Amino acid sequence: MKYGLIALLVVFTAACAQMLLKQGARKGYTPWYRQYLNGWVIGGYTLLFSAIVANIWCMHQGLQLKELSIIESMAYFFVPALSWLIFKEPITRRKMIAIGIIIVGVIVFFL
């Protein structure tokens, strides 16, 4: 269970990395390669890399791949929530229902 909580933190970290990547993509850069080599993008990819390393570590410690896959589905909750908080993107009723179904599925899997 301890590594499941760490994996959940890793999923949140990966969702934060996606926010950094989006922030980097929102700005226009010249020359063109600065679009891919700016602080936001480099920070986002650094967080994603650390999330991958942490996932491998969790599996090495005994977290099963099937459990990790289910935990990673929580990104469907974290990404819309963070995008709503940070970028003011709307969350429709349909998205809320879908996120609720995913969360219930994760809870049922671990009972």
Image (cartoon, grey):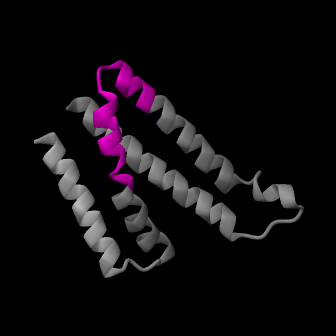
x, y percent for residue 8? 32, 43
Q: In which quarter of the image is residue 5?
A: top left
Dividing the image into 4 quarters, which one contains the C terminus?
top left
Residue at image position (36%, 80%) is: 92
Number of numbered labels in the structure image: 0
Q: In this view, does 101 lie above or below 38?
A: below
Q: What residue is rendered at 75% in x and 53% in y?
A: 36
- Give percent across and percent down for residue 95: 34, 72
Q: Can the viewer see residue 8?
A: no
Considering every residue shown, the one lying at the far right of the view is: 31
Residue 27 seen by the camera: yes
Q: In this view, does 33 lie above or below 65?
A: below
**Residue 20, above or below 106:** below
Q: What stretch is highlighted in magenta?
A: 55-75
Q: In this view, does 28 lie above or below 74?
A: below
Task: Please name the residue shown 47% across and 78% down the image.
Answer: 88
Q: Which of 102 and 31 is in front in this view?
A: 102
Q: Quadrant of the N terminus?
A: top left
56 within the magenta span: yes
Could you say which quadrant of the image residue 9 lies in? Answer: top left
| Image spot of residue 63 (x, y percent) | 29, 26
